[in-house]
Image (cartoon, rainbow, N blue to C red):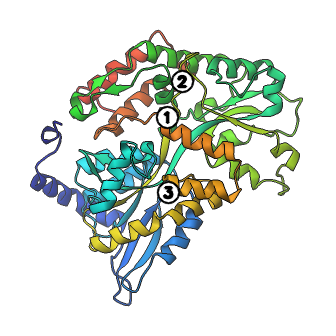
Amino acid sequence: MNQPSQRAPRGAGRRRALVAGTALVTAAGLLSACGGDGKPTLHWYVNPDGVDTFETYAKECSTDDYDISVELLPSGATDQRVQLARRLAAEDSSTDLMNLDPVFVAEFANAEWLAEIPGDLATEITNSADGEGDYLAGAADTVIWEDKAFAIPLWANTQVLWYRKSLADAAGLDMTQPVTWEQVIQAAADNNGSVGVQANKYEAYMVLINALVQGAGGDIVSDTEAGRDTKVDIDSEAGREAAAIIKMLADSQAAQSDLSVSNEGTSLGRMFLKDANAPQGAGEFMLNWTFVYKFYQGQIDAPDGITQELFDDLGYARYPATVEGEASKPPIGGIDIGVGAYSANPEFAMEAAQCITSTQAQVDLALNNGLMPSTNSAYDEVAASGDFPEDLIELYRTSVDEGGPRPKSAFYALISSAIQARWHSPTSVDPGSTPKDSADYLQDVLEGKALL
């Protein structure tokens, strides 16, 4: 791999970080690494999903040698990246533990902001990426950079197709067989339903585009180990197939009114509309993450919630195919736990990271928050709990193992932002021009000829 050309000399990076760091430290109010009683406090920066379980494990994994404090990151993946990157670029010694979207790992590892995972655990993770360990291969692969592990998988997320069984039945769709995006969009449009996706200008829209392109047998980029010299592939037949689906949805009666600003939360509300005769009142086909089952289950008999009968009408199936006859590539997401390279207490932080990614922690996140495990052993315990239908658990596990990751690149943030800039709004996507326009723009951004 051509990594030396992608990374500034370590000394130069430190000098730049110190210059920027003075302002960043003042603005961000970086936290002290020590508790009031002299015992170190490890600061664990977490995303907003599963915070109750994180707080429990912060207490349970604290020891006589250190305490763990939970610090909340912004809700959006882009804002999470910015906050963490600023802290790490400033060599903040209080950034001990981090919840990382998988696409952050390559960039942060390349910048030498993450501590390498040591010993037997690293071996287990790297072996799992080759299908020979306890971690799901898709989850393990997200934390490997230059053949080394730089984070520990905590949960492995994926998207499935959630739908009203009654809507699928009215459309005559056999949901036990693979369905295509075209079938889903047409079924919703013809039967007073809708299709829910995440198409606001943010990372989840990139997730959608990437899954559509990979489902057509293509990639947005390839040769990502070449850094800025990565090969831009989105101007392809696969790119045009993906654009055609987004245009089909945007032009369809199944498109939800907030399509251009839709996100994971806004999509949820269309599943169980109270007036079945209202426009799109028959419910929806929705692409969303694993938390959905527990979310709707928690609404049963709640004020303004749903009935058991409505919940029983909730179905789930594999991510739709971009091209009929070709297996879909469900998105792979989740959270990995990284240890900051500048932590004042690196050994304690690594010990804590292993505690908060334990099998039991993964099981609790699944049972409490609907966030699925990264290991097969934890999956087996979740399946045995009876809290989820067995076929749903296997759908999750298969989707992660057979799914498609987003590009693993030290320049992923540039790649994602450039694609979003040319594919948003979804109402403007054109198969004849959008893939080429985005390829040209991304190439210019990578070469430094254009700014985001």
Task: Kindly identify which numbered label has been placed on residue 47.
Answer: 3
Other residues around mark 1 within 10 Å, as few (<14) / some (14–19) / many (≥20): some
Task: Kindly identify which numbered label has been placed on residue 327.
Answer: 2
For the residue pair 64 and 425, the one nearer the viewer reads as 64
Dot 3: element: loop
Residue 132 vertical placement versus 41 (above, below)? above
Callout 2 amino acid: Ala
* Callouts 2 and 1 close, C-beta under 8 Å: yes
Q: Nearer the viewer, mark 3 or mark 1?
A: 1
Mark 2 to mark 1: distance in Å?
9 Å
Dot 1: element: helix
The residue to which callout 1 is attached is 402
Q: Is residue 252 left or right of residue 421?
A: right
Other residues around mark 2 within 10 Å, as few (<14) / some (14–19) / many (≥20): many
Mark 3 to mark 1: distance in Å?
26 Å
Decide which of tag 3 and tag 1 comes sooner along the chain: 3
Residue at the spot 34% in from the left edge and 65% down from the top edge: 95
Callout 1 amino acid: Glu
On-image quarter of the N terminus: top left
Decide which of tag 3 and tag 2 comes sooner along the chain: 3
